[in-house]
Image (spheres, coloured by chain):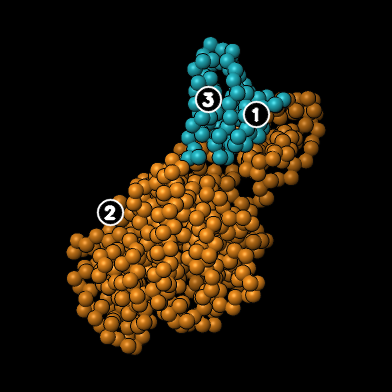
């Protein structure tokens, strides 16, 4: 399992469309992908779960990936977050 | 009896058709206990409704026209994901089985639980995403109504040619109505920048919003006329009004079938002279209109909207983001950004001057560049944001309401100082950021050569220039009759400004109302203007006039106009020139 903390840096945070991109990325892998914020944990393949994390800009999340393609999945998801979900800022 | 209702025009165009009034969007859901044997049927009904909702969204996605902003598509994608996710796709099924309740009630319970979580969020933007939950839930509820258990549903009425009346519409609804062949849309709520409005414009589907109580005032099958440009709805028009609008509708159809072809064409006159047609915008969201019109640049980006309706002015970052989003949208084409033009009719804080007395003539008071030079921290923040944004495209800074040359020197000085400051901080602003000015005060028009000497470009703001020259308050209806862009004084001032630009070899543009008014296009070309900036909605029409004009034919008309002293005959010459 790979686990590390990652900070949301896009201006609008994990809003609906950003959450959709995250879910679409996570769903492309076989590994189990989980995101947690404090005591709240979500399956990163569930859009409602991801939106419910209420992760605004500067929120620190814990990303945990486990499965056959965990390295690739972890890389892809953290790259998406670092890239601000492709948003301008 | 004809009823006349006015609202906000969302999407231009004329529509004539029978009214179809939609029921309340969020139906009241009541709880029904199911007998044991009905539970499986109810689950099947819920799943069938989910499938219909998914199919609807898939076909909406296929239908969205090319050139529509990507985020509309992404929103619909998001809603599809939500439909497939456990809280919507699975949790209600469990509730139906465990509590033996109807599907609507089960979905409502799940919806309330989700909304509660959103309502408890701190972040104001994330909080509003409960709307996404409601959109999705509403779609499933509507589909459930069509899968009413046991009873055969009658075929839904055809919406072809009807005018839809609703309280509010989602973008996906607009797409579905478009496919059903409706003639137009009327909503009680909603504004011109909503996704539904943007999509309605992409479809060229006439729409009017802000028609309060439309669903009480208008009835099913009322004969309606809708004017999406002026935001007007007429119910049960008499035959004369009807004929008038039918004629306009026919003209409009002919017109649009020709306009589309102009989008990719360059604005060149018949004798081969290139004219720059640029767009005026108020906010980054206006960019979809600009793309649709094929503008060669932004000739006026009014920045006031960033500052209005809020307690504190926006910071440097927020402004920077707004400017960059427009610059990136224009992909290297010039973007002329006007510095803050607050004061006068657009007040920040009630029109008091600093001593606390009420200014009796705010239009002549502390506004625009006068205010900016006095409130330097406000101005510095904006200039810093503008200069930083210049890394991302061709920024041109435009200063409003210049009256004396010293204002230009002060702005230039400030720009140079901030440029150094930004470079020291490690920013990389563009090497050359042109600084131009609005010529809208008669004093500046008369001394145009002076301003042309110290500025990189001039732009004529006709609205204020007319108000100041003719001494008429733009907000006072009782003197509105004096408003005349063709007053001889105006023609003289325009010539003086153009002459000033020519002498200093600096470009002169026009960005006021007059620039987008078809009846003046040839006059302005004849006077020597080659750069016009207007509301993007007028651009293709002006382009049509430009491409149909031969500049070599204009001088005799211009001479006649300049000699004419009688306003009536002046209009006659103008009409003759426009033929």
Give residue A49's mark. 1
Is B116 situated left or right of B318 in this image?
Answer: right
Write down the chain letter for disc 1. A
Select label 3 or label 2 by which is in front.
Answer: 3
Query: Foreground residue, B261 or B525?
Result: B525
- Distance from label 1 to label 3 (Cα)? 18 Å
Looking at the image, do the residues carrying marks 3 and 2 touch, with CB atoms under 8 Å apart?
no
Residue B121's quadrant in the figure? top right
Q: Residue at x 49, y 31 (%)?
A: A83
Q: x and y percent of residue A36 in the render?
A: 65, 25
Q: Which of the two discs, 1 and 3, labels the residue nearer the N terminus?
A: 1
Establish if B182 lies above or below B545.
above
- Distance from label 2 to label 1 (Cα)? 49 Å
Please identify which colour was used for chain B in the image. Answer: orange
- Can residue B517 be spotted in the picture? no
Q: x and y percent of residue B279 in the render?
A: 39, 58
Which residue does the numbered mark 2 point to in the structure image?
B265
């Amino acid at each position: 399992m790979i686990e590390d903390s990652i900070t949301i840096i896009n201006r609008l945070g994990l809003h609906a469309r950003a959450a959709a991109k995250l879910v679409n990325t996570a769903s492309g892998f076989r590994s189990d992908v989980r995101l947690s914020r404090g005591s709240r944990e979500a399956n990163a393949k569930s859009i409602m779960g991801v939106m419910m994390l209420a992760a605004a800009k500067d929120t620190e999340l814990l990303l945990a990936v486990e499965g056959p393609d965990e390295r690739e999945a972890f890389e892809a998801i953290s790259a998406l977050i670092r890239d601000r979900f492709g948003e301008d800022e | 009896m004809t009823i006349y209702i006015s609202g906000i025009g969302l999407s231009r165009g004329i529509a004539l058709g029978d009214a179809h009034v939609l029921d309340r969007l969020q139906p009241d859901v009541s709880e029904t206990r199911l007998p044991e044997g009905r539970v499986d049927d109810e689950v099947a009904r819920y799943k069938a409704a989910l499938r219909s909702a998914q199919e609807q969204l898939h076909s909406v996605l296929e239908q969205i026209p090319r050139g529509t902003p990507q985020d509309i598509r992404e929103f619909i994608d998001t809603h599809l994901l939500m439909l497939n996710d456990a809280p919507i796709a699975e949790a209600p099924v469990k509730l139906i089985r465990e509590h033996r309740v109807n599907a609507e009630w089960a979905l409502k319970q799940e919806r309330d639980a989700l909304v509660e979580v959103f309502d408890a969020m701190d972040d104001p933007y994330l909080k509003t995403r409960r709307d996404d939950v409601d959109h999705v839930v509403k779609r499933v509820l509507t589909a459930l109504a069509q899968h009413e258990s046991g009873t055969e549903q009658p075929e839904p009425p055809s919406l072809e040619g009807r005018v839809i009346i609703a309280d509010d519409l989602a973008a996906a609804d607009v797409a579905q109505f478009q496919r059903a062949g409706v003639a137009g849309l009327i909503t009680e709520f909603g504004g011109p920048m909503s996704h539904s409005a943007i999509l309605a414009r992409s479809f060229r589907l006439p729409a009017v919003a802000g028609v309060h109580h439309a669903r009480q005032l208008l009835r099913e099958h009322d004969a309606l006329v809708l004017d999406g440009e002026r935001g007007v709805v007429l119910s049960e028009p008499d035959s004369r009004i009807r004929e008038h609008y039918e004629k306009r509708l026919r003209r409009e159809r002919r017109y649009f079938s020709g306009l589309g072809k102009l989008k990719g064409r360059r604005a060149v006159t018949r004798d081969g002279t290139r004219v720059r047609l640029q767009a005026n915008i108020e906010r980054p969201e206006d960019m979809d209109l600009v793309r649709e019109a094929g503008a060669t640049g932004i000739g006026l980006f009014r920045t006031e909207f960033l500052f209005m309706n809020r307690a504190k002015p926006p910071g440097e970052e927020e402004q920077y983001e707004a400017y960059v989003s427009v610059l990136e949208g224009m992909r290297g084409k010039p973007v002329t950004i006007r510095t803050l033009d607050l004061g006068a009719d657009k007040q920040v804080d009630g029109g008091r001057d600093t001593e606390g007395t009420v200014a009796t003539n705010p239009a002549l008071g502390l506004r625009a560049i006068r205010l900016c030079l006095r409130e330097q921290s406000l101005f510095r923040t904006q200039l810093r944001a503008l200069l930083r944004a210049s890394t991302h495209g061709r920024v041109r800074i435009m200063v409003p309401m210049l009256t004396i040359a010293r204002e230009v020197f002060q702005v230039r000085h400030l720009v140079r100082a901030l440029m150094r400051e930004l470079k020291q901080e490690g920013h990389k602003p563009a090497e050359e950021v042109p600084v131009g000015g609005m010529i809208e005060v008669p004093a500046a028009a008369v001394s145009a050569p002076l301003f042309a000497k110290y500025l990189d470009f001039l732009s004529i703001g006709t609205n204020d220039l007319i108000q100041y020259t003719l001494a008429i308050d733009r907000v006072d209806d009782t003197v509105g009759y004096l408003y005349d862009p063709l007053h001889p004084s105006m023609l003289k001032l325009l010539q003086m400004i153009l002459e000033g630009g020519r002498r200093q070899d600096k470009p002169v543009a026009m960005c006021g109302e007059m620039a987008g008014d078809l009846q003046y296009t040839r006059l302005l070309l004849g006077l020597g203007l080659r750069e016009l900036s207007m509301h993007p909605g007028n651009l293709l029409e002006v382009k049509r006039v430009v491409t149909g004009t031969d500049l070599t034919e204009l001088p005799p008309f211009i001479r006649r106009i300049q000699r004419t002293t009688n306003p009536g005959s002046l209009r006659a010459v103008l009409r003759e020139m426009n033929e």
